[in-house]
Each structure stands twice: as C-alpha cells, then as structure tokens.
Amino acid sequence: MNIYLVRHGDDDERYRGGWSDLPLIEEGIKKCEKLGDYLYKHKDEFKIEKIISSDLKRARMTADIINEKLKVPIIYDERLRENNNGVLAGMLNEKAIKEYPNIFFSNLEYDERFPEGESPKEFFERIKKAFMDIIEENKSVKNLMIVTHAGVISIIYHVINNLKWTNKVKALKIGKTSISKIVIDKDNNIKYDYQNYTPHLEN
C-alpha cells in the first residue's frame, strides 16, 4: 500500500490556522491546480484510487481541485484536522496577540489545552489513532492520497519513525501542496519513502 500525504495549499497567513475554516488564497489555488495537473500527467506512476481529506476548507479545496483531474472517490474526514486551537481558530494574528498573549501551540504544556480547544497530547493521540484507523479501513486500496495539514503530517512522520513527538519539536519542512510518500509492504512494515516532494512547482 502506498499513501501519499499532501499538505493543503496556501491560506491567508494573517489569520491563525488550526481549526480555521478560511479558504485558500489565489496563490494556493494555483499551486493546487499545478499539483492536479502533475498527478494527472503522471497518473500511471501514482495510480491514486481514493482521496481522504481533512474537512477544513483549505484542505477540502485542495482535495477538490486535485480531484478535478483525478476524478476518484473522495471522503472528507474531521479526524484529519489540524490541532484544535479553539477560540483562536481563524482569528487575526493581531487580535490573537492582544487578547491571548503568549498562547501559541509551542508554548503550551503537553497536557494544556488551547482555550476551548485541545492539548498537544490530545492532538497527538487523535492523529495517531486516526492514521492507524484509516490504514485499517482502507486495506483494499493500493494507492491512497491523504490531504491534510503540516501538524498532522509531522505527527505521522514521528509515529512511523518511532520518534518522540512533542509540541516543542522543531517543525518539519513540509511545503504547501508538497507530497510525502509512505509505503506499507506485504508484511505490514511501514516506512517513509520521500518527503516534501514538489516537482509541480519547479517550472
């Protein structure tokens, strides 16, 4: 089984992310269109059979744009959302800094929740379980694409490589619309094949 993890396209960085449901900006849409074109052009290599996407708008839009070319079954799954930052989701950065100074994901204690949100520990446990469940639920799919968020991809990377994850770790380099490939062999061994692959942005 091959799993292709795709980070969503560019959104408006003036606003806090997390569970924000703001759409892609024009640059993000263009990158998604380029990725869709690339995957269609190389469809015999990727052979994508199904897409599972976070249901947050920036991921949904990314998945939908890609699927305009691939035309495969698509599912929107709330389990694949970015960390739940509660009341800060979609808030202007300037306002967030004024109203919630020093409330950043990397500043939280491992079991400390965002106001009306989740803790880093809860986020990690949610994503680890969701990823393992999705693998189990899609055993018949040979080539699966998952469209999600940088924080989610980072947790999956740490889980697969048996690395300790906390919200204090240095962020992985995961570009917008980049592809990371995971391979699960017939003995259920799982490994990363490549990460942060962006050939569609080279021209």
Image (cartoon, rainbow, N blue to C red):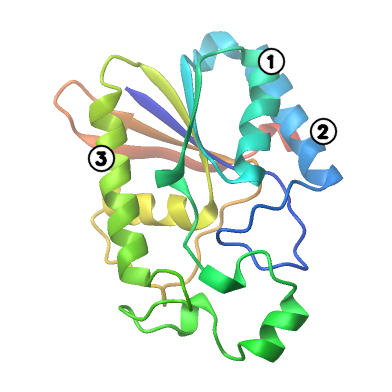
As helix, strand or loop, the secondary structure at mark 1 comes to helix
What residue lies at 69% left-to-right and 44% top-to-bottom?
A: 9
Q: Residues within 10 Å of mark 2 (few under 14, many from 20)?
A: few
Lower sequence index among marks 2 and 1: 1
Horizontal and vertical percent position of residue 120: 37, 70
Lower sequence index among marks 2 and 3: 3
Lower sequence index among marks 3 and 1: 1
Horizontal and vertical percent position of residue 51: 50, 25
Residue 132 badge: 3
- Quarter location, residue 108: bottom left
What residue lies at 65% left-to-right and 41% top-to-bottom?
A: 177
Residue 43 shown left or right of residue 83 in the figure: right
For label 2, the residue is 203
Residue at the right extreme, as displayed = 26
Query: Are the residues at dot 3 and dot 1 in contact (C-beta closer than 8 Å)?
Result: no
Q: Nearer the viewer, mark 2 or mark 3?
A: 3
Residue type, label 3:
Met
> As rendered, which of 171 and 30 lies closer to the eye?
30
Q: Quadrant of the N terminus?
A: top left
> As rendered, which of 55 and 193 lies closer to the eye?
55
As helix, strand or loop, the secondary structure at mark 3 comes to helix
Q: Quote the CA–CA distance across marks 3 and 1.
A: 28 Å
Q: Residues within 10 Å of mark 1 (few under 14, many from 20)?
A: some
Horizontal and vertical percent position of residue 197: 58, 39
Residue type, label 1:
Lys
For label 1, the residue is 69
Residue type, label 2:
Asn
